[in-house]
Image (cartoon, helix red, strand yellow):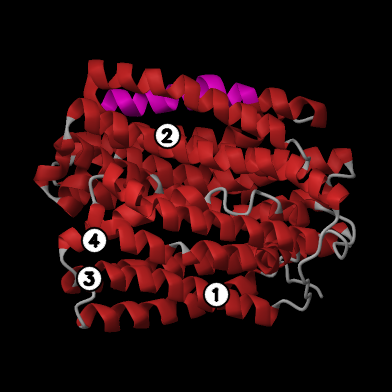
């Protein structure tokens, strides 16, 4: 595949992934509002407990071995049967563990009524294991259009099941069956659209290599889950449920740029980096270019959320949620850093550095926990948010830069790529603060400050428009 063909496929895949991400999120908001009117709050709590358990186990469900299919540049015919066996076996084993351990899990979380829901949702682990290879092949071949079809089918089927069962009074079970219906329908579409068919097989040598690569990634996924959730435990234990509610709202808002911009790029970045890793110069240059383009769209979204945190929360959520603004600005900065770090994760994974990724996330969690406690003690939820940012910027970013060195990726070169978005972001902050100092109406602060700051940002990053247009205009070639 030529460089031009690769860029065309990547551009097309990013467009499809962005469309998919946007539509799925908008649809999810609508269906959540509907289901909230049909299902009692306590039933949502039961489902939430089951979902926590499922998400923890899903993070390691296929042992990270499917990523090996995505990153390999050679034929996959010999590897795929072993990946199929490992994925299916691990998913089945973890499902059995969930079924047997469900009473203990639910009692430990003080929700014994969640036992049956956990046991039902364990079926999703078997489905995930069975569909891991078709999903990896879609990612490897940049077929995000097929992923869009699968996700759309999953949403339609899952919504129909949830609404019907909710009307019938099934409560939390409605949401559990929705998850099963979503996973099953998505798996059926993925199998249908994926041309390659691989039956389970076993090659001991390949199995050892796959596990050596995949297990550190699976461990990293579990650590990432810890990094992104341990703050809730700290806030709840040290500051109480009211402050936890404020913090949860702020963290969810701050995660929107990550979900909106990072997710579409990450759907193709591992495969794209893997395709060019044999060319050292192109390999390191591809990361810098991807980071620059990602920063171009992430920075303005993050700056608007941070600079307009107080008026946004007051206008959208009401005065009683205003304390959440104290943490939002810092958590938005964390979100911006996460976008870059997640791209770095995929770059190292494409290079086969799964052990380095594991060590980085071990350090991340170990450094984060004590700082979160200190932050909570001295400055409440703002201190917790500050601790998150300090660890990500001062500890983890340098760790990634050290891991990048063998591949020629240098901090100076990345800084050059990020210079214009950074300067544009600084100018946006100045414009918003200026508008807020002369306009009292919070609605006008949002509208006028948002419009003028975006215009200022556009003027600063205008020279980068050619790179963006190149991505948008490229057509995928067969």
Marks 2 and 3 close (CB-CB < 8 Å): no
Sequence-wise, which precedes: disc 4 or disc 2?
Answer: 4
User: Which residue corresponds to the image point at 20% horizontal and 44% vertical from the top-left?
Assistant: 311
Q: Which is closer to the viewer, label 1 or label 3? A: 3
Residue 57 shown left or right of residue 431 in the figure: right
SS at circle 2: helix
Judge the density around disc 2: few (<14), some (14-19), many (≥20) Cα neighbours within 10 Å: many
Name the N-terminal-most of marks 1 and 3.
3
Q: Is residue 59 left or right of residue 279?
A: left
Marks 1,3: beta carbons within 8 A: no
Q: Which residue is mark 3?
A: 171
Give the label on residue 186, or none.
Answer: 1
Mark 4 or mark 1: which comes first in sequence? 4
Q: Residue at x 65, y 33 (%)?
A: 357
| Whether residue 472 is visible | no
Q: Of the two numbered discs 3 and 4 on the same chain, state the one appearing first in sequence.
A: 4
The residue identified by callout 4 is 44
Q: CA distance from mark 3 to mark 4?
A: 8 Å
């Amino acid at each position: 595949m030529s460089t031009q063909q690769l860029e065309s496929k990547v551009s097309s895949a990013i467009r499809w992934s962005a469309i998919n991400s946007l539509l799925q999120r908008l649809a999810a908001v609508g269906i959540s509002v509907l289901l909230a009117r049909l299902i009692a709050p306590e039933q949502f709590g039961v489902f939430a407990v089951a979902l926590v358990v499922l998400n923890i186990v899903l993070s390691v469900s296929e042992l990270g071995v499917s990523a090996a299919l995505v990153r390999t540049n050679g034929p996959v015919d010999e590897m795929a049967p072993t990946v199929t066996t490992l994925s299916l076996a691990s998913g089945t084993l973890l499902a059995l563990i969930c079924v047997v351990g469900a009473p203990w899990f639910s009692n430990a979380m003080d929700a014994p009524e969640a036992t049956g829901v956990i046991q039902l949702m364990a079926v999703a682990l078997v489905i995930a294991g069975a569909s891991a290879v078709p999903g990896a092949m879609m990612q490897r071949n940049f077929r995000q259009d097929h992923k869009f079809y699968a996700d759309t089918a999953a949403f339609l089927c899952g919504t129909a099941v949830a609404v019907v069962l909710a009307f019938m009074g099934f409560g939390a079970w409605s949401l559990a069956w929705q998850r099963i219906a979503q996973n099953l329908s998505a798996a059926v579409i993925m199998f249908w659209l994926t041309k390659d068919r691989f039956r389970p097989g076993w090659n001991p040598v390949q199995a050892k290599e796959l596990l050596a690569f995949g297990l550190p990634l699976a461990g990293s996924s579990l650590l990432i889950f810890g990094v992104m959730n341990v703050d809730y435990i700290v806030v709840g234990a040290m500051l109480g449920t009211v402050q936890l509610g404020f913090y949860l709202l702020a963290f969810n808002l701050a995660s929107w740029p990550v979900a909106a911009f990072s997710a579409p790029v990450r759907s193709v970045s591992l495969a794209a980096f893997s395709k060019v890793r044999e060319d050292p110069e192109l390999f390191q240059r591809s990361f810098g270019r991807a980071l620059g383009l990602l920063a171009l769209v992430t920075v303005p979204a993050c700056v608007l959320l941070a600079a307009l945190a107080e008026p946004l929360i007051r206008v959208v959520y009401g005065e009683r949620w205003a304390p959440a603004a104290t943490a939002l600005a810092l958590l938005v900065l964390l979100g911006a850093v996460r976008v870059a770090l997640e791209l770095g994760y995929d770059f190292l994974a494409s290079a086969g550095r799964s052990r380095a990724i594991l060590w980085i996330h071990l350090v991340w969690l170990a450094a984060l926990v004590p700082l979160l406690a200190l932050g909570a003690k001295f400055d409440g939820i703002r201190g917790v948010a500050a601790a998150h940012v300090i660890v990500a910027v001062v500890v983890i970013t340098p760790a990634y830069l050290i891991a990048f060195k063998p591949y020629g990726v240098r901090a100076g070169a990345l800084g050059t790529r990020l210079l214009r978005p950074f300067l544009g972001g600084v100018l946006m902050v100045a414009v918003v603060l200026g508008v807020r100092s002369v306009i009292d109406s919070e609605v006008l602060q949002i509208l006028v400050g948002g419009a003028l700051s975006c215009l200022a940002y556009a003027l600063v990053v205008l020279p980068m428009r050619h790179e963006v247009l190149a991505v948008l205009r490229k057509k995928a070639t067969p």
